[in-house]
Image (cartoon, rainbow, N blue to C red):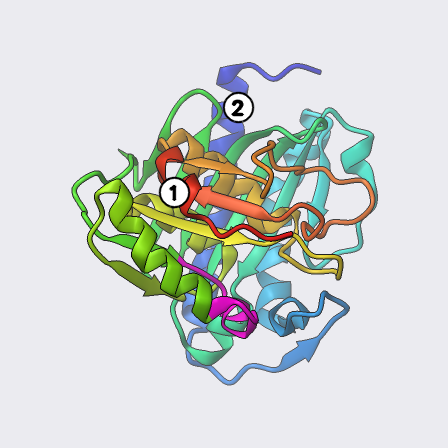
Amino acid sequence: MYLSDEQLKELCNIAKKAASLAGDYISQNKGTQIEVQSKVGGENIASCVVTEIDLKAQEIIIKTLEPTLKKYDLGLLAEESLDNNSRFEKDYFWCIDPLDGTLCFSKGEDGYSTSIALIKKDGTPMIGVVYNPRADSLYHAVLGLGAFKDESPLKVNTKNENLTLLFDQSYLKYPEYAKQVKELKIKLKEIGLKELNIHPLGGAVMNGISTIEMAPAFYYKFPKKTDGGGSLWDFAASSIIQSEAGGFNSDYYLNPLDLNRKETTFMNHKGVIYCSSKDLLGLIPKVD
């Protein structure tokens, strides 16, 4: 099945509605006493946390998207549901993260969002929609049609002379963290930048998108053998929004992100890179 630009726009509008409805629900429950549960995840504690807010937000999203599943014969992959493998059978599938940055939300910290993407069976992101409830901001993109924030074009910020390093809290535990940050502070001057801003924002979704708004900026996750490193839904929507806004994203080896991985939904096998510009790639620390 082939989806035209008009059909993709229609599906994008439905996804925007779904993200906004879920985001409104999340906002309404901000600061309330919530039950934090555990689930099977990677080695990172953030991937093992789930709340009733995640579950209800996902229910809202799926209810809104449900008519499109039959109309366009779409598959579905959602973080808080079992993978039914429809993503391997259908030409396109919805990829949903109802509340990325659950740990941030549960602590009342910035960095959480709702994320919805439409992915082609070969792993190509076609639509990306992200809602940031804390800022009441809605991002969206359709492949080849540009990226938008609250209906205004979203483009790389080119006015800043400082480099921003965005990262997950897990990076602070990385043995080479201090050494790598020290080297970054030296190397950035080689490409005409002045200082390094360190910004541990929170969830992977907002980290990826923030490489555009905080540019020059980058966000990277090293390849590793243990499960983790984020999952498909952590990068599906943000990757197309970020690239359509003029940024660059890939796996750690500069190949396209594997957004329909067969073995697992985890992305630890090849790592992740988001850069506001390819000019920054030479600054990313090298690992074996």
Q: How many marks?
A: 2
**Magenta-tinted stretch:** 166-177
Would residue 133 be visible to someone looking at this image? no
Would residue 67 be visible to someone looking at this image? yes
Image point 56% across, 54% down: which residue?
A: 221
Image point 55% across, 81% down: which residue?
A: 34
In this rendered view, identify the residue nearer to me: 45 or 84. 45
Identify the disc placed on residue 139: 1
Judging by the rendered image, the residue that carries numbered circle 2 is 8
* Other residues around mark 1 within 10 Å, as few (<14) / some (14–19) / many (≥20): many
Q: Residue type at mark 2?
A: Leu
Q: Residue type at mark 1?
A: Tyr
Residue 220 locus on image (x, y percent): 50, 52
- Please say if 66 is above or below 233: above
Spatial CA distance of label 2 from label 1 is 15 Å
Reading the chain from its start, which is encountered first: label 2 or label 1? Answer: 2
* Other residues around mark 2 within 10 Å, as few (<14) / some (14–19) / many (≥20): some
| Left or right relative to 169: residue 197 | left
Q: Look at the image and say whether residue 187 sits in the magenta stretch.
A: no
Residue 35 locus on image (x, y percent): 61, 82
Judge depth for marks 2 and 1 and give the one in front: 1
Residue 61 locus on image (x, y percent): 58, 50
Quadrant in the picture for residue 89: top right
In this rendered view, identify the residue nearer to me: 159 or 147. 159
